[in-house]
Every structure is written in structure tokens, then in C-alpha cells.
Image: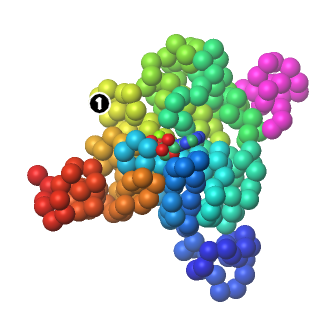
Amino acid sequence: MALGRSYREAKGETAGGAASEEPLLRVEGLSKRFQGVLALRDYRLSLRAGEILGVIGPNGAGKTTLINLLSGFLKPDAGRILFRGWDLTRIPTHRIPALGIARTFQNLRLFPSLTALENVLVAMTVQHPPGVLSTLFGFGPWGRRWQALRDQGMALLEQMGIAHLAERPAGALSYGDQRRVEIARALALQPQLLLLDEPTAGLHPEESEALIEQLARLHRERRIAILLVAHDMPVVMRFCPRLHVLNSGALLAEGTPEEIRNHPLVLEAFLGRPRGSRAA
Ligand SMILES: Nc1ncnc2c1ncn2[C@@H]1O[C@H](COP(=O)(O)OP(=O)(O)O)[C@@H](O)[C@H]1O
Ligand SMILES: [Mg+2]
């Protein structure tokens, strides 16, 4: 199917559309330039509901730019981002989370003096406007809903294995646990697509392993689509059945971890091996 169908068509409301084949996310011709730097060029991507895709590449490859574009933090210079039929490039940034896309940040962006639970509850303002803030501060006619929201927030922390840290200031938690709060906060938006920007960066190998294990469990339970960006190869190789390799803003290769490990262009670009030679 060609790009550029209307929302009605994308939802299968017109005759002849194979709606069930329409991916959750479809990106084509996506480009973003910063002054002289082409951070992303003519990138394409297709992701089905519930699918996991890993995007790997060296520093400066354009991975964070991709997440910024998909989450609406940046608008592209060219290309389209179709999510559930919506062209996100035409939708105001603040509306995008409510459509079902949540993200985390390479550099953590929590409210350090709020508790872990409060960080999650604040995110719920997107899903439950407008009463949550008044609820948080104990006034307004929201008393009963307050308890329900707290319960939901606690369930998310529980899912990330940090319910026991709910009342601690986020800034006092270990780096790995702050990452967990950030993921719980993203889940509070009830996304269909979760964008994770280097979730294991700065973690020790055992911590990375534990976090990835938790993400895998989360995915089994919730079946949300996940786009995980990383340069930590073992992590993505284990978690992601399908990979994209970005290099200098361009899609260099795609395939299974096994295919990527032996891909001649990848070997040449990242390991300095000439084409045709085999991985050790
Ligand atoms: N806001 C920005 N202003 C100027 N240049 C940027 C900006 N964001 C990213 N870049 C540049 O775009 C390229 C890709 O960056 P980025 O997407 O952060 O890569 P990655 O996340 O893969 O390390 C880099 O050359 C980077 O310096
Ligand atoms: Mg980055």
C-alpha cells in the first residue's frame, strides 16, 4: 500500500484496504539536518503491533535523533511518520503521547526531588486530565480516584521491580533504579509503542542484564511494540529479534542478530574487516 492514505483508509474504513496488514508504525524518507550535519537521511522503518526492533549504531549515528522524531520532539525536514494511520509530522508534539507513544531519555529526565511514585503519577496527567494535579496535592473532588491512580502507579513500579522504593526521592535512587522509574513513567501513558533511548547506558553488565530481563517480561505481559536504541551490542542482540544498523544517519543494514553479526557492511564499518572475511 502506498504511503499517504487518509486516517480513515488506514483504519480500514474504506473498501479494499488490508487494514490488518497495516503496521503500527511506518516511516518513510525520514531526514533531519542540523546545520551542516545530516543526522538522519532517507530512513525507513516498519513496525508491527507488539514487535521489538533494536536500532544500533555508533555515537552520532542518528539514534537519538530518530527517537526525537518519532516522539515529536523534533520535526523532520522530509519524510512521513505514520502511526496507527496518523501522520505524526503534522500532529502537535503535545498530542503525541496520548496517541500511544511514550519514550525514555538517554540522559535521565526525572524530577529528582519528587518520589519515584510521584514521578509516575505526574505522567498520568496525560491520560487523566485535568484532575490529577489537584488530586496529587490533596484537593478537589478526586479523592476516590486518587487511590485508584496511586494503585496504578504502584502497579507500574511493581512491574519494574521497584515498588519498595516508591516513597524515595527519585534523585536518591541508583542509576539503574532511576531508569526503572523512567520506564514506569513511560508505561503510565499506556503506550502501544515504547521508545527506549539507551536504557542500559551507564549500567554495569549485571545491571544491564537485569533491566533487559525485566523489559522482556514486560513485553511478554503487555505486548507493546518496543523500539530500543543502543550501542551495547550484547544487550540488543539478546532482546531484539530484529535489528536496524544506523551509520552516519543512514540505514546500513537490517536483519536478525545473527544476520547483523555477519553482515559484510557492518563488519566493514564497525570492525574494520574487509568485505568477504568472516567474523571470528
Ligand atoms: N540538537 C542538535 N543540534 C545540532 N546537532 C545535533 C543535534 N542533535 C544531534 N545532532 C547531531 O546529529 C548527529 C546524530 O546525533 P544523535 O542522533 O544524537 O546520535 P546518536 O544518538 O546515535 O549518538 C550527530 O552528529 C549530532 O552531533
Ligand atoms: Mg543518542
Q: Where in the figure is residue 202, as x and y percent of width and height?
A: 39, 27
Percent position of residue 9, x then y: 70, 76
**In the rendered image of this protein, does residue 126 appear above or below residue 14?**
above
Mark 1 lies on residue: 205
Foreground residue, 200 or 181? Answer: 200
Identify which residue, 85 or 219, lies in the foreground: 85
Q: Is residue 59 left or right of residue 227?
A: left
Q: Quadrant of the N terminus?
A: bottom right
Q: Residue furthest right?
A: 141
SS assignment at label 1? helix
Decide if residue 191 is in sight here: no
Q: How is the protein colored in the picture?
A: rainbow
Q: How far across and down, in percent of the image, does residue 107 sit?
A: 52, 30
Q: Is residue 251 magenta?
A: no
Q: Is residue 111 visible?
A: yes
Q: Which residues are magenta?
A: 129-147
Q: Residue 59: x, y in percent? A: 40, 41
Amino acid at the residue labelled 1:
Pro
Quadrant of res 16? bottom right
Question: Residue visible at 43% across and 25% down?
Answer: 176
